[in-house]
Image (spheres, helix red, strand yellow):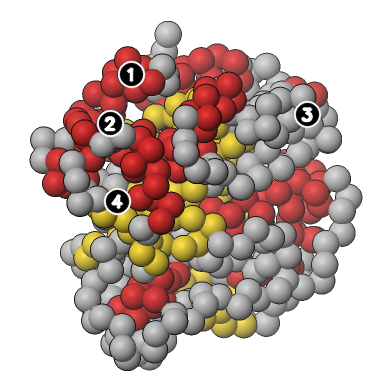
Amino acid sequence: MVSSTNNIHRLKSSMRLSSVAPATVTGRKVHELTNVDLAMKLHYIKGVYFFNTYAVEGLTVFDLKKPMVIHLLPLYFVAAGRIRRSETGRPFIMCNDGGVRIVEARCDETVDEWMAMAVEDDSTFDGLAYNEALGDTDLDFSPLVFIQFTWFKCGGMSVGISWANVLGDAFSASTFINLWGKTMAGYVPHKSLHVPDWPAKPELPLSVLPKVTPNALKRVDSVGHLWLTPNNCKMKTHTFHVPGAKINHFLSDQKFKVSAFEVLSAIIWKTLSKIKENPEETRMVTLCTNKFREREFESPSNGMVWSTVEADFWVAEAEVSELVELILNKREDENGMIEEMMGNTETGEKSSNFIAYGAKLTFVNLEEIEIYGLELKGQKPVYANYSINGVGDEGVVLVLPGPKCGNEGDDINGDRSVTMVLPENQLAQLKVELKRNWSIA
């Protein structure tokens, strides 16, 4: 079998790049970035959707682009903007209709062959969602969003989205691409998006909040005009698939009513604590959860809740139920502190260089994200998955709906996909431990 590196190289050699912009002139509106937006500026959301031949048969690039120009981008004009800086140095988005970058690629393998390679090596997905950080060429001209269409030998196609996290979170990215699918089917969306009233004001006045760095963030070296920070170790991505029957079994063992996210996070937290050379490093973890269920007609935003939870006992020796209870009842919301810290200078320069995902081991609850909500010609993806680029050395764990989650006739919870970005050596050990102790592979 040809290596994934060779496949990605061949994909890149076949790529054609173009841009699409709103059909109506936006008029150079300014989109001010919130303090939480700026805390996310070094991260990128990546999504990949695989469709079979029947879903894309007869579709041309023109067919795929046209609804973006006419319906999608006139609504999401901020996604077609570019980063600029104010006189004080604070970044904002100039809605100048610079456009969303479109990438076309062709693959010599079938969808099934590509998926089989991904079982062994998730880096196979890397070539399907274009990888370019803001400032890779010139920050003033860097697109915030890339959409990649990759045609396979079998006639199937993948849709990849690369979404700058400074623009909005994974729910915003998913809502954006799902709406594109609806416009492909002839749906005419609202004429404008509602600007959400968040982040909510913290309970305490900002002047009373502790003037310390939130535990959920980590200061990194200055990045200048390239919005990406290097890692100190080799990071690797892998996705575990947890069947609905196993999810129900895990939940039945708990004393409280909990979700799959809490239980899977507790299992992985405990297991990684065993693997770590210094267990103290995993006493505290970060949780990232969704606060607002409805995003369909909302402007892109970073509306997730960031919190931390700390154990005062050895996590490796704890019962999973103890960790679940800790996650449920002892988390401390840090959004107010993030707002305070990111806005504590007039220029924003002091607070501009931080990472969130991977500053501590980070668990992200994407159970409610509609990654199977993107449809082409009435067909759902045969498989979809999300990941994050720009993750810090402590790693990130995303809990997502699996292909059978919520399907009619399935059990109440359905399956889950768990995508992890971790140091390569830790991930290798984690695979062994999860398979041996929890039958998760």
Q: Are marks 1 and 2 in contact (CB under 8 Å)?
A: yes
The image's mark for residue 23 is: none
Task: State the residue position of label 4.
Answer: 285
What is the total number of numbered labels drawn onto the structure image? Answer: 4
Q: Position of residue 421 (x, y in %)?
A: 35, 39
State the SS at label 2.
Answer: helix
State the SS at label 4.
Answer: strand
Task: State the residue position of label 1.
Answer: 437
Residue shown at 73% from the left, 65% from the top: 297
Can the viewer see residue 99 in this picture?
no
Residue 256 position (above or below residue 244): below
| Distance CA(mark 4)–CA(mark 3) | 35 Å
Horizontally, residue 279 falls left or right of residue 434, namely left
Q: Earlier in the sequence, mark 1 or mark 2?
A: 2
Task: State the residue position of label 2.
Answer: 271
Residue 236 position (above or below residue 190): above
Judged from this view, the residue extending furthest toward the left is 278
Horizontally, residue 297 falls left or right of residue 234, namely right
| Distance CA(mark 2)–CA(mark 4) | 13 Å
Report the front residue among 38 and 72. Answer: 38
Q: Earlier in the sequence, mark 4 or mark 1?
A: 4
Say which amino acid is labelled 3: Glu
The image's mark for residue 408 is: 3
